[in-house]
Amino acid sequence: MKKKKNTIKLQKQNTKKAKSEPSKRESFKIKKSDSKFLARIKKGGKTVYKTLRAKKIQEIKKKLLARKETLLAEAEEALNELPGQTIFPDLGDQATAETERNFMLRLRGRERRLLKKIDDAIERIDSGVFGICEKCGMEIDIRRLEARPVTTLCIECKTQQEEEEKLIEK
C-alpha cells in the first residue's frame, strides 16, 4: 500500500513538471534580428555587472577608510594609556605589569600590520587592480571581498596556499 502512494506522488510530480515545461509548439525561436538584440543585452549585462561591482568596491573602500580611522584612534589612545616601565616592590606584580605591557604591544603590532594591509587595499582600489587574485589573475568573488577586504587571493588560491603551508608544517 505504501508503494502505491509513492508511485502516485511520483506520477503527480512528473505531471507537474510536464505542464510547467513549454511544449514544442510553445518554444521560442530566435531570429537573426533577435540575436543582435540578445548580444546587446549580454553586453549590457556585463556593463551592469561591472557597474555593480564598482559600486561594491567603492563601498568597501569607504569601510576600509572608516576602519583605518578607528584603528588609528584606538592606537593613539592605547599609546597614551600605555604605562611606562614601573618598578613594583613585589616581583609578581612587576611580572604581571610587564606581561600586560607586552600583550598591549603585540596587539599594536597586529594593528600596525592590519593598517598596512588596509593601505595596500586602498592603493589597489585606486590603481584599479583591487579584487584581482595576485596568484591566478582571476576576479575575487565580491562576497569574499566584502567579508575580507584586505585579501589578495581568491578562495581557491588561498585554500591551496593553506594546504601547502600545512604540508610544510608536517
Image (spheres, grey):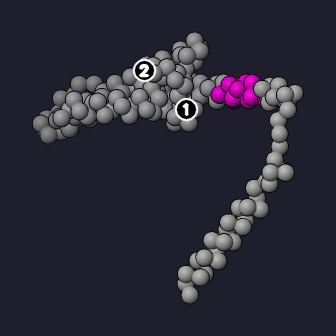
**Does 162 sit left or right of 147 as displayed?**
left
Residue at position x 49%, y 33% from top? 148
Q: Secondary structure at mark 2?
A: loop
Q: Secondary structure at mark 1?
A: loop
> What is the residue that sits farthest to the bottom in this orientation?
1
Residue at position x 70%, y 26% from top? 46
> How far from the left and from the top, in percent, is residue 102?
25, 30
Q: Nearer the viewer, residue 64 or 27?
A: 27
Residue carrying label 2 = 135
User: Can see residue 55?
Assistant: no
> Residue 156 lies in what quarter of the image?
top left
Q: Main secondary structure of the magenta part?
A: helix
Residue at position x 14%, y 40% from top? 92
> Residue 88 lies in what quarter of the image?
top left
Q: Which residues are magenta?
A: 41-53
Q: Nearer the viewer, residue 121 or 94?
A: 121
Question: Looking at the rendering, in which quadrant would you find the C terminus?
Answer: top left
**Does 101 sit left or right of 154 as displayed?**
left
Residue carrying label 1 = 141
